Structures are given as C-alpha cells and as structure tokens.
Amino acid sequence: MEGRTHPARLWRPLKDGAVQCRLCSHFCVVAPGGRGQCGVRENRARDGVGDFVTLVYGLPAAMNVDPVEKKPLHHFLPGTRTFSFGAMGCNMGCTFCQNASLSQPPRLGRGVTGHLAGPAELVDAALESGSKSISYTYSEPTIFFELVEDTAKLARTRGLKNILVTNGFMSAECLDACGPAETGLIQAANVDLKAFSEDFYRERCGAALAPVLKNLKHMRGLGWWLEVTTLLIPGLNDGADELKALAGFIASELGPDTPWHISRFHPDYKLLDRPVTPHESLLAARDTGRAAGLRFVYVGNASGPGFGDTLCPSCGKTVIRREGFRCAPCGVQGGTCLECGQGLPGVWA
Ligand code: SF4
C-alpha cells in the first residue's frame, strides 16, 4: 500500500523553489518535483516555494520481533526481544546490499510501499510483543527519520528503549535531533563501518567514509551504547593493513570496550563474483581486532567455537554463550562477572 505524504524535517528552502535536505551527509539539493538520492523525500514546490515531504512516514515495509543479538547488539539488554521495523529506501547504493529489495527500489525510481502504521500502533505492537526496545533497522533509519523521531519519543514515555541500526551517514543535525542517550531519543546503535577506505565507500556504496567516522565519535559523545559491524568481503575490504587501521580507529577513538562484529559475506545483489568469506579470514580479522586492543570481538553470520561468546576481560571466563541468536548468560548478573566481580561494559537492565 502507498502511504500518505508527511512534512519532512531538517531541510531548508533555496532559490526558485529548490530545497536542500539536511538529513544525511549527501545534503541533496532537490529541484521542484524532484526527489533526493534516497528516493523517498520529494520536493512538492508550489508557486516557486519549496515544500519537502517524506513518502515513508507511517509506512513500515518490514516488521518483526527479533532477539536483540540479531541487530547485532551483544552488550545492550542481552537476551531480550526488540520490536524491529524499517521502511523502503536508503541513502547508500551498496553493490553488496543484503536487503536490496527493501533498500534500493526507491533509489531506482520505483514505487514506495509498506503497511500503514503510525507511531502509536508501532509502540503498541512493541509492548504487546514483550519487547524491551524498538529497533529502527532493515533499511537505513536516517531516511525515515520523521517516523523514528515520533515513534522513539512515544516509546520512551512508555518505558521502551530505542536502537538505531545504521550506516552512520546521517548529518550532525540529525544526530543532534536524536539527542543524548539519557534525555534524547536513542539509547544504542549498531553502526556499519563497511571499510576503511574512501575509494570503497565512493565506488561500492555511493557515499563517503569521513562523515561516518565523524558520526561514530559524535554518537560516542552523545553517550549512546555503540557496537560496530564490518561485513568482511573477500578481496575488497579484508586487507591486513586496512583492518588494522579500522580496528585501531575503533579502539582509539571509540574505546577498547566498543564491541566489533565481523560478519561473514555471502554473494548478494550486484556483487555475485566474490566467494563467501573464508573461515580463516574471519579468524584473522578477529586476531587483528584483539591485537588492536579491542576487548570484545565477535564473528557473526557464521558458526564456530566461541564466535558469539562474551568473555570476561579480567578473568577470561565465558559469561554469555551464544549459538546463532540464542543467548545464554552463564556467568554474569546485572553486568558483573560472577567469577571475579569485574563490571562488564554495556547496558544490562
Ligand atoms: S536523506 Fe540524504 S539522500 Fe535523502 S534527500 Fe536527504 S540528503 Fe538526500
């Protein structure tokens, strides 16, 4: 079903009915009648005056109740459910997108569809499902920001936390509108750090790396609980030097307690000429992360001994065992290691 249009936020009028969108780091200038790169924000100028609208307000296209481990977040209310939804569209055009049927059609000028559901219905559904949080996910939540903002505001008043699963390419204004974890809308984020090369972001995603790095530090400053994910693509972003630099950035700029999720690639969308990430590459990347000083490095989308387990960084005991998305705390209570009493970083209650 097609949705109703809704006033867009974070834009400014320009001359001759054009507008500039301020929501993400593309800062699209949109002529009357045109849409931004994401394909879901349109300039409905009238009488030479720009009027910017979103086409995806109240129109989630994918909805599920997921384990929070699936986002992935391993240190944010582990073992709980999170009500998850996303609308169509994205501000990136990654050739390896694993959710292309949801993210890419609007960028290609195709229709925008979904289920009619506004903030109140979404929050009611989250509470009925027994979830402790709402995750804005599946596609890029920046491009359905108005729905995120209104849903997250309501969710907070009803005791739910809010999670962004994002490519991190939003604008600083967008982050400031989300606000600090304590008093604002968002309490946690998993951010894709897709590579550590501007060439990769430009050629493979149609975006840029620098804003993502800046935004990660901005989110840290806002006090959000942060975890980072890198999809490891053979021959494209898995070079030893690149991974060393990427892991070094996380450790030095975001802190060694920031969990890093290394995710196995499988061929998808336009990137069909690369193999599934070999097991050895996943293990080598995990070693690189640990050597950089990261205390929590996880391997996802693959099975192997200890890939998803959380170990106490002080005594080395396994405190949470994970098999797929099943999570079994076995040595932690309230964020404290039962063996040695070490406090574990994260949000536990
Ligand atoms: S959200 Fe980003 S891609 Fe979409 S119109 Fe705004 S600046 Fe452009």
Image (cartoon, rainbow, N blue to C red):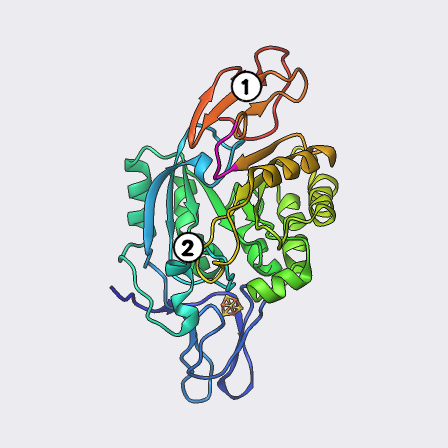
Tell me the residue that label 2 is attached to. 99
Front in this rendered view, residue 129 or 8: 129
In the drawing, what numbered circle is on residue 319?
A: 1
**Which residues are drawn in magenta?**
300-304
Front in this rendered view, residue 131 or 299: 299
Residue at disc 2, secondary structure: loop
For badge 2, the amino acid type reads: Asn
User: In terms of image quadrants, where is residue 42?
Assistant: bottom left
Q: Earlier in the sequence, mark 2 or mark 1?
A: 2
The spot of residue 37 in percent (x, y) is 49, 71
For badge 1, the amino acid type reads: Val
- Crowdedness of circle 2 by 10 Å Cα count: few (<14), some, many (20+)? few
For residue 69, side relative to residue 119 (left or right):
right
Magenta segment includes 21: no
How many discs mark residues in the rendered view? 2
What separation in Å lies between label 2 and label 1 (alpha carbons)?
Answer: 32 Å
In the drawing, what numbered circle is on residue 8?
A: none
Instruction: Give the vertical position of 247 relative to 332 (above or below).
Output: below
Instruction: Give the vertical position of 84 relative to 99 (above or below).
Output: above
> Do residues under tags 2 and 1 come within 8 Å of each other at their CB atoms?
no
The spot of residue 200 in percent (x, y) is 63, 60
User: In terms of image quadrants, where is residue 345?
Assistant: top right
